[in-house]
Image (cartoon, helix red, strand yellow):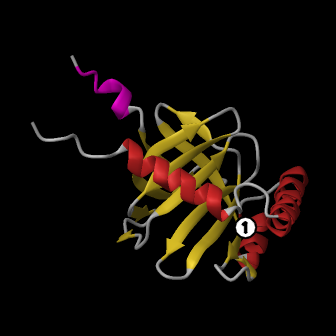
Amino acid sequence: MYDNRSLFHKWRKVQAYKHDGTLHRQWSPAFVVQENEDCWVLASKASLVTEADGRKWMTKEKAIFILFKRKWMNVIAMFKEGKGICYYVNIASPTLDDGGYLKYIDYDLDVKVYPDGVEKTLDEKEYSRHITQYGYPADLSHAIETSMEQVKAMIERKEFPFQGEVIEAFYQSFLDQNKPLPKR
């Protein structure tokens, strides 16, 4: 007899919160390609994203989402048709598994790496505003800024997860694990 409980555990919702505990953003379930002691690797062909204000939108591309368990970051690697992989890095708390939901706190600062390797830091004004609005303590601001430095060094050295061939292999694993059953 087929046990679909194992399949259920392969699909997870991801939720991002703000420092005050309010839900910031949620993604429709993505498939867990791999989990190890360092991270979860999820894949999707497209995701429904629900914003805190209820607005909903669909992502346009297939993607790999790497959620770290101990690092202050997570990465969405998006496949841009005909261009390559674009990396979007959220500086965020380490991700926790809370009853099947993968949750983290988004700390505003982001880094985008375009397929041509150009890197851009995003949301610096939002981060500065939220330091005051949410009352980030000095040790939290230090952790956030240290993570930003570490992310930029990882990008420069092309360390995991900033390795196209690894990201492509994860996506192929997703496809292999989700092949339709043969017809009888």
Residue 150 appears in the rendering? yes
Image vertical order of residue 93 relative to residue 134, above or below: above
Q: Position of residue 73 (x, y in %)?
A: 72, 55
Query: Which residue range is magenta in the image?
Result: 2-8
Q: Amino acid at mark 1?
A: His
Residue under the image location 22 percent in, 40 percent down: 181
Q: Is-magenta flag for residue 6?
A: yes
Q: Position of residue 77 (x, y in %)?
A: 58, 64
Res 131 quadrant in image: bottom right
In this orientation, which residue lies closer to the viewer: 126 or 30? 30
Res 165 quadrant in image: bottom right
Residue under the image location 64 percent in, 43 percent down: 95
Residue under the image location 62 percent in, 48 percent down: 67
Which element type, helix, strand or loop, lies under badge 1? helix
Q: Position of residue 52 (x, y in %)?
A: 46, 62
| Total numbered circles | 1
In-image side of 141 versus 184 (left or right): right
Residue under the image location 12 percent in, 41 percent down: 183
For the C terminus, the quadrant is top left
Q: Position of residue 152 (x, y in %)?
A: 83, 67
Instruction: Look at mark 1 in the image and give the residue it sits on.
Output: 130
Image vertical order of residue 27 relative to residue 152, above or below: above
